[in-house]
Image (cartoon, rainbow, N blue to C red):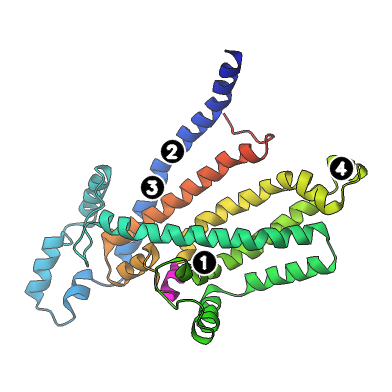
Amino acid sequence: MGLAGGVRRRRTPVIRYFIRRLTALVPVALGVVTLTFALVHLVPGDPVVAMLGDYAAPADVQALRHELGLDRPLWRQYVAFLYGLAHGDLGESISQREPVSRLIRERYPATVELAVAGLAAAILIAFPLGLVAGADPGGPADMGAMGFAILGISVPHLYLGPLLMIVFSLDLGWLPLTGRGGLSHLILPALTLGAALAAILARMLRQSLVEVSDADYMRTARAKGLSRPRALIGHGLRNALTPVVTLLGLEAGALLTGSIVTEIIFSWPGLGRLMITAINNRDYPLVQGCVMVFALSYVAVNLATDLLYSAIDPRVRLSR
């Protein structure tokens, strides 16, 4: 009974914190929707003219604008959008004449798949580099690993993606050039998306390991006969992960929005390409829906990161 009561008491702050953060999503979502609505409608251009062409008859333009509700005052369009949003309706795409929610559901899994693959690629690259560099600060391994990290930060997606396509697709023929399919289609986009994050994570992990190496418990471990690498991995790594997880949570959310450029380069059928197409077509409802999904996804990832802190470091406690 005492053990069960203790477990319930430990869970209570987490549940309260989770509910409080979920409640905070409401004004965040409203702010994102309002700002996006205002900015999209301020962009020059007419979606009706984009659909019908510059030489469309004025009567046809006026009829389609009335059909789409674009002839109403802006504040009425905003209220109508909020009303639909409150009922789970994101509206209808102007250019594709399909429900926005359906279009997002079709494309969002591809974006999540790419973001998760990019995150996995970043972790697989960063952790070996960070461990090697942190185990021998100032040594040849540290210089080589950090040099590679600086290179990863310096090369932008717009250059790295085409470079990987030229080498591994056109020259060597090992991997597909574009599109979404099996694992082979995912490798190049994931490397392109995760390269910069891998460099940042490697540098952060290296710095964290250097800092914890001077702790008392690390000196005790070394005094017991453990080598520096074994002491770092066995005793210091867990404590060094807290700042790394902080950065990882922030950057994991950014991967979703950062995937837009990668999706364009590799013709990846995700939410980013859908949003760019919607912007070009002045498709107001679709742009608003895509931006809102990106923003809420970012907030959700940060919430998951906060909840992960206490699991990695027991000293971290969620505020009551």
Say if mark 2 contacts mark 3, CB within 8 Å. no
State the quadrant of the N terminus: top right
- The disc labelled 1 sits on which kind of residue? Ala
Alpha carbon distance from label 4 to label 2: 42 Å
- Residue at (54, 78) in percent of width and height: 164
Asked whether residue 298 is drawn in magenta, I would say: no
Q: Is residue 203 visible?
A: no
- The disc labelled 3 sits on which kind of residue? Ala
Quadrant in the rendering for residue 46? bottom left
The secondary structure type at the circle numbered 2 is: helix
Alpha carbon distance from label 1 to label 2: 30 Å
Chain-order first, disc 3 or disc 4: 3
Mark 3 surroundings: few (<14), some (14-19) or many (≥20) residues within 10 A: some
The secondary structure type at the circle numbered 4 is: helix
Q: Is residue 254 above or below residue 216?
A: below
Q: Which mark is residue 190?
A: 1
Chain-order first, disc 1 or disc 3: 3
State the quadrant of the C terminus: top right
Alpha carbon distance from label 2 to label 3: 11 Å
Disc 2 designates what residue?
A: 22
Direction from residue 294 to residue 284 in the image, left or right: left
